[in-house]
Image (cartoon, rainbow, N blue to C red):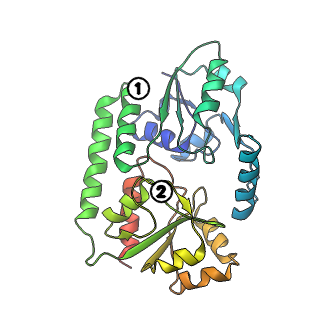
Amino acid sequence: MRVVSLFPAATEMVAALGGAGLLVGVSDQCDWPPAVRALPRVTRSSLDPALTAAGIDRAMARAQAGGTPSGSIDEELLRRLQPDLVIGQSLCEVCAIGGDAAATAMARLDSRPASLTLHAHTLEEVLRDIQRVADALDLSSEGDELVRGMRYRLRVVRNRTPIPPPRVLVLEWLDPPYVAGHWVPELVRIAGGEDVGNPPGARSVARPWEALAALSPDLVVIALCGFDLPRAHREFAGLRAPEAAPLFVRPPKFLDGNAYTSRPGPRLAEAAELLALLMRG
């Protein structure tokens, strides 16, 4: 089987299931496991990576207002790769190619590969998506094993939770400030905290600094979507909003959101473990 993955979490699922050798193409954002960086890139982003967080936000707003996608698929490369299965997503068109763009590109192919679209908002839905990918790859037993392993790791974290639970706020963007949602509040709860910013399964949401400060969190975690730790530290150091100061009377802690909290895949178990470590000090 020849597989093309259009977003990082799907690539990580395939690899964790033991199917890395099936991948023949990945998205421009796929970087884990490291071996996939050598694979052909079937997507391109229209965003300038040198833009600041505020610049990216403005560029995305302009693109959405004009009906312009934030990325594109290299249809000629996709045709040459001749995939049997294309795995896409319909959760966020900012982070990856959306389902409509993928469907349009696939409809133009001479061959008609199977497609699988993932759309998880909760941790349980992520686990189901992993099993769906495993079934599509004829690796159902490996899917069962991977999901059981993740559940075990999450149970271990939950059994070590601190008392009383700290009030935690997870920010996935700083300019403007966005509160992390989807599966992140569940990870916070599993790690022993109380997420004061968002309920489980809710979409990430922009909120003003004054409203975030009024939540009075015990711990602020900065886990920026699409940015690694060095970039997250730079974005925080460059924050110039005076109204944000009350929220950061206590210094925030940082988690690699690009690797862990923003990707609905196997590394969410590690995200819960890392959040637990941050809460313990």
Residue 106, by quadrant, is top right
Q: Is residue 118 left or right of residue 29?
A: left
Q: Residue at x 28, y 31 (%)?
A: 141
Residue 223 % position (x, y): 53, 64
Residue 212 % position (x, y): 53, 74
Q: Is residue 57 left or right of residue 122?
A: right
Mark 2 lies on a secondary structure that is loop
Viewer-proximal residue among 85 and 61:
61
Residue 40 % position (x, y): 65, 34
* Mark sitting on residue 260: 2
* Mark sitting on residue 242: none
Is 103 drawn above or below residue 93 in the view shown?
above
Q: Residue at x 67, y 36 (%)?
A: 43
Is 121 drawn above or below residue 252 in the view shown?
above
Viewer-proximal residue among 29 and 193:
193
Q: Is residue 242 left or right of residue 168?
A: right
Q: Which residue is mark 1?
A: 136
Residue 71, by quadrant, is top right
Q: Is residue 188 left or right of residue 144?
A: right
Viewer-proximal residue among 248 and 45:
248
Q: Residue at x 29, y 56 (%)?
A: 154
Is 229 drawn above or below residue 132 in the view shown?
below
Mark 1 lies on a secondary structure that is helix
Q: Residue furthest left?
A: 159
Query: In the rendered structure, are the residues bearing label 2 and label 1 in contact, judged by CB atoms less than 8 Å apart?
Result: no
The amino acid sitting under disc 2 is Tyr
Within-10-Å neighbours for mark 1: few <14, some 14–19, many 20+ = some
